[in-house]
Amino acid sequence: MNSAPGHSTSASVTVSTAADGTLKYRFSSERGLGAEAAHFFVPDRDIPHIACVSTQLGCAVACQFCSTAPTGFDRNLTAEEIALQVSTIVDNAAACGVSHADFEVSFMGMGEPLANANNVLLALDRIHRRYPLMTRAALSTVGPGRRIVALADERGPDRLPIHLQISLHATTDRLRHALIPNAADGIQSLLAAGRYYHLKTSDRVCLNYILFDGVNDSPEDASWFDSLDRDAFSVRLTVLNDVPNMPRHLRAASGSSFIAFSNRLTELRVPHKIFRGDGLDVRASCGQLVARPVEITARELHD
């Protein structure tokens, strides 16, 4: 681990470099928990650099496939703390010749962004003023639908456009509740909110769907997507990343299951892509960030 240069802040910043070049940032604080963020470089994208940042310390949603879940919810990050993650990543990349025009901000780190919407939007406005050549942000949410509707209504001509991703992961409310115990809305409510977001923004909403072996990868699950509005939604079939203490029955679907599921969506003409995370060896990818407590020495406890 190396200290990240170029920033003066009360939080110490460390950087881990993955074999694929992904950079994982950890912003430690005196409170014992730290926000984690990542810088991904995906050369075949129109916007090749992604600053993926956290919006909360811990999370109350309790997704069964996420490292943040055991931490529980600690607190919302402030707009300043969110913006600091972005500026640290972008400014350090600028020192290596990367323009901020080549960056997208992704609110897909630790936490549920729409449970901290005010600070996220304030941070986004600060980011847009500081980096005016940025053209897009992205945000992933489990809902509820009313927060998605509110986000759509917050859209303005001077605000950086937000590409919305809804964490779906199931085709029935019963299974989705088992995978995401504290998600408030049913699937149909989320889809209605997603359609509203599409109508307000003209942007196609992405439904993220992690494929679990024998859980949600059946032919019937794939056929469920035939009911989707193809103009309003696309699907991202996501490979499950390894996280500690995940329930034993949750395993990554096999390659053949991915192919069969994807082929069925192709037959149904459902727009979709397959996604595999980067930075896995430093645990920087989806579901792997964690607000782990920093060890406190006996001397510190005594003081």
Image (cartoon, grey):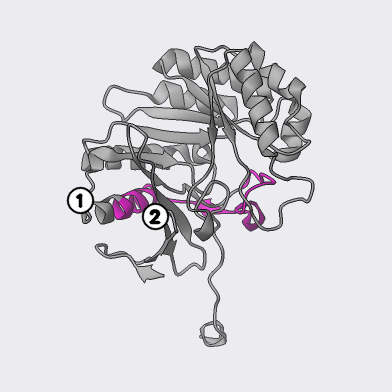
**According to the image, label 2 marks what residue?**
21
Disc 2 and disc 1: Cα gap in Å? Answer: 15 Å
Is-magenta flag for residue 74? yes
Q: Is mark 2 on a helix, strand or loop?
A: loop
- In the rendered image, which quarter is residue 99 located in? top left
Residue 3, above or below 244: below
Is-magenta flag for residue 83? yes
Q: Looking at the image, can residue 125 be seen?
A: yes
Q: Which of marks 2 and 1 is in front?
A: 2
Type of amino acid at the residue the image marks with label 2: Gly
Give coordinates of residue 19: x percent, y percent.
Answer: 44, 58
**According to the image, label 1 marks what residue?**
97
Q: In this view, does 236 lie to the left or right of 135?
A: right
Q: How crowded is mark 2: few (under 14 residues within 10 Å), some or many (20 or more)?
A: few
Quick one: 282 or 85, which is closer to the camera?
282
Name the residue located 48 percent from the left edge and 53 percent from the top edge.
279
Quick one: 192 or 25, which is closer to the camera?
25
Q: Is residue 217 left or right of residue 165?
A: right
Name the residue located 31 percent from the left edge and 40 percent from the top edge.
103
Give coordinates of residue 168: x percent, y percent.
Answer: 63, 30
Give coordinates of residue 226: x percent, y percent.
Answer: 65, 13
Residue 69, above or below 129: below
Residue 12, above or below 205: below
Q: Give the range drawn in magenta.
A: 60-89
Give coordinates of residue 128: x percent, y percent.
Answer: 27, 37
Type of amino acid at the residue the image marks with label 1: Gly
Q: Is mark 1 on a helix, strand or loop?
A: loop
